[in-house]
Image (cartoon, rainbow, N blue to C red):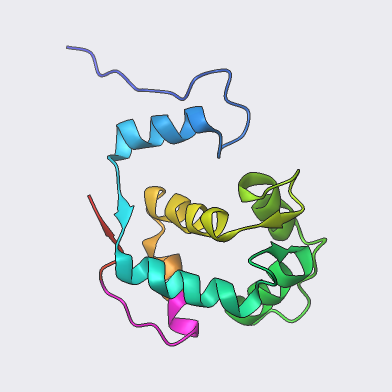
Amino acid sequence: FFLMIRRPPRSTRKESSAASDVYKRQVHGEKEMTEKVKAALKDVFEKFAKDRRMDGDAAALFTQNTTGESLVTKSDNRIKMLLASFGKEGGSYIDLEGFYNFYKDAIVNNREDVVRKNLAVYGYRTHVLCVD
């Protein structure tokens, strides 16, 4: 009896690549955010987005408000990773879909506690984040 450990494809360079996402769904099962959570995330996104886009400065402001860290700027590695992994036009901004995908990635990676804490900062008390 052998236990096979599945690995992402070797061609996968970034954790957020499509191949890696397929791998995560195969291993962890497909999880979808509830409509209530999507509505809450949309509300939070719109607080910081301009013209339905969140650029580096807006993402830094979002991170400052969410984490309480006042020194976050667009040059922070977290902001760079967010924009590079989930952004549009070479990472110059993130749209609502990318914002959803950022949080869905956290859920798939079993970090629902982070999503809950982030939403709580904005007054959302949601106990059901996703459905299988």
* Residue at figure coordinates x 40%, y 72% from the top left: 39
Is the residue 97 above or below the residue 49 in the image?
Answer: above
- Residue 73: % across, % down: 80, 69
Q: How many marks?
A: 0
Q: Is residue 121 magenta?
A: yes
Is the residue 71 above or below the residue 114 in the image?
Answer: below
Main SS, magenta region, reads loop
- Residue 130: % across, % down: 29, 59
* Residue at figure coordinates x 29%, y 42% from the top left: 30
- Residue 53: % across, % down: 67, 64
Task: Write down the region rendered in magenta.
Answer: 119-127
- Would residue 82 appear left or right of 122 to someone viewing this image? right
* Residue at figure coordinates x 43%, y 54% from the top left: 104
- Would residue 46 appear left or right of 91 to someone viewing this image? left
Is the residue 68 above or below the residue 105 in the image?
Answer: below
Q: Quadrant of residue 90?
A: top right
Q: Work out whether residue 100 or residue 4 is closer to the camera in this orientation and state it.
A: 100
- Residue 49: % across, % down: 65, 71
Q: Work out whether residue 9 or residue 22 is closer to the camera in this orientation and state it.
A: 22
Which residue is most to the right? 75
**Quadrant in which the N terminus appears:** top left
Q: Is residue 58 magenta?
A: no
